[in-house]
Image (spheres, helix red, strand yellow):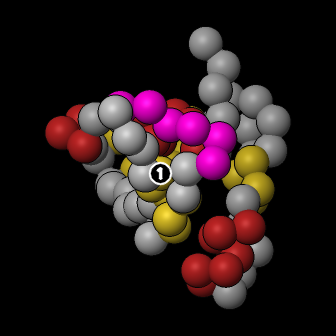
């Protein structure tokens, strides 16, 4: 099943790491790699990467009442 690299990594169980991945098709390029390391990075078909962990960059929470989220509920970004 095809998946974006970002979605796949976030679906991994932390207990299953480290995980070695091979890029199967397309080119993956993510701005966050550029922002973190100051270098442009792209992964081409056939390249191998090792996922050793991941961290949460942003958390968005909504306040709700009676277990319901309304369209007017406050949203807080942490």
Q: Residue furthest top?
A: 1
In depth, the one of 45 and 38 nearer the eye is: 38
SS for dot 1:
strand
- Up the image or down, 10 lies above or below 40; here it is above
Q: Residue at 50% across / 65% down in the picture?
A: 76
Residue under label 1, please give it: 62
Q: Is residue 50 visible?
A: no
The secondary structure making up most of the magenta span is loop
Residue 13: give x, y in percent of width and height: 28, 35
Q: How many labels does the image show?
A: 1
Residue 53 colored magenta? no
Q: In this view, does 39 lie to the left or right of 69?
A: right
Residue 71 colored magenta? yes
State which quadrant residue 22 falls in: top right
State which quadrant residue 23 falls in: top right
Residue 54: give x, y in percent of width and height: 38, 57
Q: Residue at 80% across / 44% down in the picture?
A: 27
Q: Is residue 52 left or right of residue 75?
A: left
Q: Residue at 44% across / 31% down in the picture?
A: 68
Give the residues drawn in magenta, as a range.
67-72
């Amino acid at each position: 099943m095809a998946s974006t690299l970002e979605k796949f990594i976030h679906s991994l169980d932390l207990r299953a790491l480290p995980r070695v991945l091979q890029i199967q098709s397309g080119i993956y390029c993510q701005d966050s790699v550029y922002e973190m390391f100051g270098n442009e990075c792209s992964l081409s078909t056939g390249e191998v990467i090792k996922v050793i962990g991941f961290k949460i960059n942003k958390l968005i929470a909504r306040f709700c009442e009676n277990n319901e989220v309304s369209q007017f509920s406050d949203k807080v970004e942490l």
